[in-house]
Each structure stands twice: as structure tokens, then as C-alpha cells.
Image: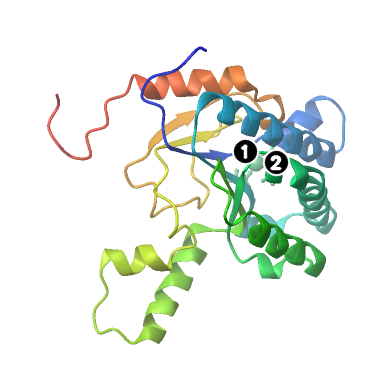
């Protein structure tokens, strides 16, 4: 089997370009989101084959509520269908689902489905599929600080912040991939990606394939991570 050296353990993906993918084809934006969900399935399979342990997908941001209601609820429909249609596969592939973001603000049945799948997959030991839904890094930090304020500690340390983040059960991402040519973070995991490598792909998310993922991983494998230390 073809293998890439220095694989990242945790890859975070800012899936961008669904709308432009659709507009380019004279399709409604939701068709782009639909195809984006297929790309998620494709990239999960590719990540399993390549040996990546944790995949975080940015699916819906706290800022995305600003979009038309039709698009917002259309995205939730797609997430709902995605979870329903992939639940068997998640179980059979030993995939553990995690979620970042206040998913209780989503439509009730969707929130219930998420809770059910988190519970059903919690002891799975294969790939960790972390979905960021209604997620924003500032929101996450505000929530964390409020939890700590309630604890009433006179002083807080980095480990206190880390244990109150949504991602407290996961190591920090090693690599962040953003598709569609935009070069910004859009409020994604700001605390956790302090030392992450960033990779920007011009490809719109619905067109992103295993080949593009491999290209990103090969690029990452050549980088030297220094964490503030000396050059080797
Ligand atoms: C990313 O695609 C998906 C979400 C933000 C939900 P966009 O919908 O942002 O696509 P563009 O950026 O408009 O092309
Ligand atoms: C970031 O994409 C959010 C997700 C991928 C869910 P956006 O398209 O919403 O970000 P901006 O508006 O370009 O910053
Ligand atoms: Mg976008």
C-alpha cells in the first residue's frame, strides 16, 4: 500500500466553496451543499485508507445564521440526511462521532439524532469524526470562560481553558485545510490551531477528492514543525 510519511494525527477541514461550485454550474446553492456532503463521505474513506486518526469538518459556523433561512435550514436537512444515511457505516467502520458547537440550537429532531449517534458511537475505537456545527471559536472561548467563572477559581491556567473547550477530548489539529482559495480561518478553532500547519487548496469543496487530500498531506509531510525551537 502507498503510504505517506509524517502523517498528521488530526486534520481539520474548512469546507468552503459549496456555493460557488453550484453557481458555476447554474445550480442552486443547496445543490453545492448536497455535493459537499458526498465529499465528506469520500474524504472519510480516504482518511481511513491513508491512516489519519481524527478528522474535523467545519460544517456550519455561528456566523452562518446570517444566510437566508432557506439555505440555513437546507443545510440542516442535508446534515440530517447525512447522519441518517451514514449511521450504519459509522457503526460498521468503528467510527466515533464527536461534535463541537452548541448543537442544541439546531432543529430538535436533528439535535436528538446527534445525541443518539454520539451515544451509540462513543466506545468506537476507529477514526474520530468530529463535526463542527453551530461552532465558532469565539463562542467556544466565551463558553469556556463562563464555565470557569462558575467554578469560581481565583486564577485560571491553560489546562483549565483546554478542559472546557468543546474539543477537550481531542489533541490539537496538526493540519488545517481550507478549500476554495480563501485564505482565512473564519473563526475556526482559534485556540487549538496555535501551532497547526495551514494548507490552502483552490478546489471547491464538492470537487475535493482523495487525490487533493494526498497532495495536502504530502505538502505537510515536507514541512518542519518547530514549535518555537531552533532550526534542525
Ligand atoms: C461552505 O460553502 C459551506 C458552509 C459554509 C456551510 P459556502 O456555502 O461558504 O460556499 P461559498 O463560499 O459561498 O462558495
Ligand atoms: C466558513 O466558511 C464556515 C464553514 C466552512 C462552515 P464561510 O464561507 O462561512 O466563511 P467566510 O464567510 O468566507 O469567512
Ligand atoms: Mg464560503
Query: At which x and y percent is residue 140?
Result: 49, 64
Task: Judge by depth and name the residue closer to the eye, 44 or 12.
Answer: 44
Whole-Å distance between the Cαs marked 1 and 2?
Answer: 25 Å
The structure residue drawn at horizontal position 75% and vertical position 47%, both measured from the top left corner, is 87
Q: Quadrant of residue 213?
A: top right
Q: Quadrant of ligand 1?
A: top right
The structure residue drawn at horizontal position 38% and vertical position 20%, both measured from the top left corner, is 5
Residue 23 in the image: above or below residue 218: below
Asked if residue 133 shows in the view, the reply is yes
Q: Name which of mark 1 and mark 2 comes first in the sequence.
A: 1
Residue receiving disc 1? 15
Label 1 CB sits under 8 Å from any ligand 2 atom? yes
Q: Quadrant of residue 14?
A: top right
Instruction: Report helix, strand or loop for mark 1.
Output: loop
Left or right, residue 214 beside residue 153: right
Residue receiving disc 2? 92
Task: Judge by depth and name the residue closer to the eye, 51 or 94.
Answer: 94
Amino acid at each position: 500500500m502507498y503510504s505517506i510519511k509524517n502523517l498528521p494525527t488530526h486534520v481539520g477541514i474548512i469546507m468552503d466553496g459549496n456555493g460557488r461550485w453550484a453557481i458555476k454550474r447554474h445550480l442552486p446553492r443547496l445543490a453545492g451543499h448536497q455535493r459537499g456532503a458526498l465529499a465528506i463521505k469520500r474524504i472519510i474513506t480516504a482518511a481511513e485508507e491513508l491512516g489519519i486518526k481524527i478528522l474535523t469538518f467545519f460544517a456550519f459556523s455561528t456566523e452562518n445564521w446570517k444566510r437566508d433561512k432557506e439555505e440555513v435550514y437546507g443545510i440542516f436537512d442535508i446534515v440530517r440526511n447525512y447522519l441518517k444515511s451514514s449511521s450504519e457505516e459509522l457503526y460498521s467502520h468503528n467510527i466515533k462521532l464527536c461534535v463541537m458547537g452548541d448543537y442544541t440550537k439546531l432543529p430538535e429532531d436533528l439535535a436528538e439524532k446527534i445525541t443518539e449517534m454520539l451515544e451509540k458511537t462513543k466506545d468506537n475505537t476507529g477514526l474520530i469524526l468530529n463535526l463542527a456545527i453551530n461552532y465558532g471559536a469565539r463562542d467556544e472561548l466565551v463558553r469556556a470562560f463562563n464555565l470557569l467563572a462558575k467554578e469560581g477559581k481565583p486564577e485560571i491556567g491553560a489546562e483549565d481553558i483546554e478542559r472546557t473547550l468543546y474539543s477537550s477530548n481531542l489533541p490539537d489539529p496538526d493540519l488545517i485545510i481550507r478549500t476554495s482559495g480563501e485564505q482565512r480561518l473564519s473563526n475556526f478553532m482559534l485556540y487549538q490551531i496555535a501551532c497547526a500547519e495551514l494548507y490552502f487548496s483552490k478546489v471547491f469543496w464538492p470537487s475535493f477528492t482523495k487525490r487533493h487530500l494526498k497532495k495536502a498531506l504530502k505538502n505537510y509531510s515536507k514541512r518542519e514543525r518547530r514549535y518555537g525551537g531552533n532550526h534542525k
